[in-house]
Image (cartoon, rainbow, N blue to C red):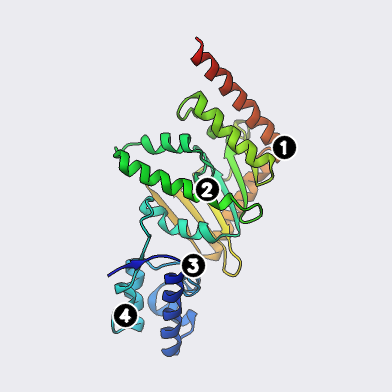
Amino acid sequence: MAIEDNPETRRKYGEELRRRREAAGLTQEQLSEITIISRTHIAHMEAGRRRPDIADARRLDKALGPDDFFERFLPTLDGKAVAEHFAEALEFEGVATVIREYAPKLVPGILQTEAYAREVLSSGSSAKSDEERDKLLGTRLERARILDEFDSPVVWTILDEAVLRRHVGGPQVMCEQLRHILGMGESRRIRVHVLPFSAGYHALMEGFVSLMWFKDLPPIAYVEGLKSGRVWEEPSVVRECQVAYDHALGDALSHRKSLAKIRSVAEEYEHAARQDQHP
């Protein structure tokens, strides 16, 4: 049996976890050792910011049972269509106070325009029906709403120059996409840095990274590859990712120079779009 996932149900789920843990006379650290679930993971669940996966729920039931509560009432994402490996990171993204991302090939999801996102979701190795694509598109566009408020979360984005140069959807789509990023940067809603090809090899070359900080919980790192992604909570790993981000940031263009670069490439796309319309 699964219940609808929303902040209220996650809060109640976390309260029940804390109640049962304390009734068993266990600290978060002790429960962590018994269940082989990290203490920070348990803290996130008790705070209502995170849900366990099925394996974690079963470990909690084994330690705190005996009624299989945590598996029977495991929340599910309320109809939100995302890749399975990104579901956990999506929950963190919605409550983060600071997000710092590095994008090696594509515009990050929260910055994608509808036309750009539609092209990304329509392509790829696995065919999608129009209904499935539109559901994924709706979730992706909803994610961008976290940028509606001016000061929360604080967003920094490093874009590899490949993100600007890769033709996704044609010149018109790319022009609109880059002008969207430009507008967000000029309005100071995000801070954007372009990592130029001339930087050569850099610390984040291996793939997409998203670092997130929270008001009252430890920071996390989310790394993603082909058909895979993982949330890291271990302080040592998170710190390594933060250091790598800082090194890459040092190789990137300044915010002002990055905006000039984005503007210049957008103008190139605009010119190409006009040529397509009037060959």
Identify the residue position indicated by label 2 in the image.
Answer: 144
The residue drawn where x is 39% and y is 68% is: 52
Marks 2 and 1, Cα distance to the nearest angstrom? 23 Å
Q: Nearer the viewer, mark 1 or mark 3?
A: 3
Marks 2 and 3, Cα distance to the nearest angstrom? 19 Å
Q: Secondary structure at mark 3?
A: loop
Which label is found at residue 49? 3
Q: Secondary structure at mark 4?
A: helix
The answer to which of marks 3 and 4 sits earlier in the sequence is: 3
Marks 3 and 4, Cα distance to the nearest angstrom? 22 Å
Identify the residue position indicated by label 1 in the image.
Answer: 256
Q: Give residue 204's position: percent from left, percent from top.
A: 55, 45
Marks 2 and 4, Cα distance to the nearest angstrom? 39 Å
The residue drawn where x is 31% and y is 80% is: 62
Query: Pointer 2 and pointer 1: residues touching (CB < 8 Å)?
Result: no
The residue drawn where x is 52% and y is 46% is: 110
Crowd tier of the residue under label 2, counting other residues whose Cα lies within 10 Å: few below 14, some 14–19, many 20 or above: some
Q: Amino acid at mark 1?
A: Arg
Report the front residue among 104 and 18.
18
Q: Secondary structure at mark 2?
A: helix
Report the front residue among 65 and 4.
4
| Number of numbered markers | 4
The answer to which of marks 1 and 3 sits earlier in the sequence is: 3
Identify the residue position indicated by label 4 in the image.
Answer: 62
Q: Give residue 76's position: percent from left, percent from top.
A: 35, 63
The answer to which of marks 2 and 3 sits earlier in the sequence is: 3
Report the front residue among 279 and 69.
279
Crowd tier of the residue under label 3, counting other residues whose Cα lies within 10 Å: few below 14, some 14–19, many 20 or above: some
